[in-house]
Image: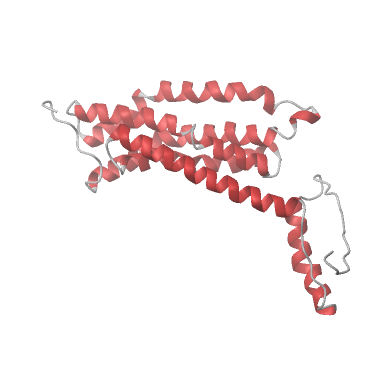
Amino acid sequence: MNGERTVTVHGDVDSKVTNTAALISQLSNEYLPELLEKYPQVRVSIEGETKEGTTTRLSILRGMLIGMLGVFILLSFQFESYTEPLVVMIAIPLALIGVVAGHLIMGINLSMPSILGFVSLAGIVVNDSILLVLFLKHQRNQGMELLEAASMAGRRRFRAIILTSLTTIAGLLPLLTERSLQAQILIPLATSIAFGLLASTILVLFVIASIYAILGDLNLARPPKTREE
């Protein structure tokens, strides 16, 4: 290659024993340093899934950041505030708890489809937060105190939030229980969405209203509209 002698080593990874990331990490930490010390003139280049995976992850991260920026801009117009959209978007990192727990429960490794599933959650889990914050803001505009509105929001919006999430999770159950070979590539994606949405739904009921109340104490939440407004 380009006038230089090359040796290409191919290999397949048995996913029941290990994964590509762990194998490459072990290779880089244990074998390659010894090889390069013994043959300093040798250059090693790791290609294939590892290289393409890095490129794909960077592309997904860039797309996710653009998507979250779009969500923030839309919510800013809706709430007429720059802090309240951040409260709504806290549901996104909360979903990561369910993603990790779901993979542990299902006994599968985090993979590229898993990451794609988590990225998809960024536009799904905010729905529950929007329901909660809109109700909270409505109650404040009706003259209710912030702490009272925050404590009532979870109780009054419980049914709507739970039903919104359960319908999505129920639609993914057939895929989660599928055992055919063709479905194996999609199961990590479905696991991320289903368990991430479940965790986010439960945590949103407690966390979002609490954080909104904290913003009110710090005078960072948008004040309620008066009757004249």
**Residue depicted at 40% across the width and 25% down the height:** 158
Q: With respect to residue 178, does 192 lie above or below?
A: below
- Determine the residue located farthest toward the left in the rendered image: 228
Q: Nearer the viewer, residue 42 or 143?
A: 42
Q: Nearer the viewer, residue 195 or 79?
A: 79
Q: Is residue 200 visible from the viewing direction of this image?
A: yes
**Residue depicted at 88% across the width and 68% down the height:** 5
- Looking at the figure, which quarter contains the C terminus? top left
**Residue depicted at 34% across the width and 42% down the height:** 211
Q: With respect to residue 25, does 128 lie above or below?
A: above
Expressed as whole percent of the image width and height from the top left, the position of residue 57 reads 62, 49
Q: Is residue 101 visible from the viewing direction of this image?
A: no
**Residue depicted at 89% across the width and 64% down the height:** 7
Q: Which color mode does the image show? A: secondary structure
Q: With respect to residue 117, does 220 lie above or below?
A: below
Expressed as whole percent of the image width and height from the top left, the position of residue 51 reads 71, 54
Expressed as whole percent of the image width and height from the top left, the position of residue 46 reads 77, 60
Expressed as whole percent of the image width and height from the top left, the position of residue 113 reads 66, 39
Q: Which of 40 and 193 is in front in this view?
A: 40
Q: Which quadrant of the structure image shows residue 68? A: top left
Q: Which of 218 and 5 is in front in this view?
A: 5
Q: In this view, does 107 lie to the left or right of 13?
A: left
- Looking at the figure, which quarter contains the N terminus? bottom right
- Determine the residue located farthest toward the front in the rendered image: 3
Q: With respect to residue 70, does 136 lie above or below?
A: above
Total labels drawn = 0
Q: Which quadrant of the structure image shows residue 129? A: top left
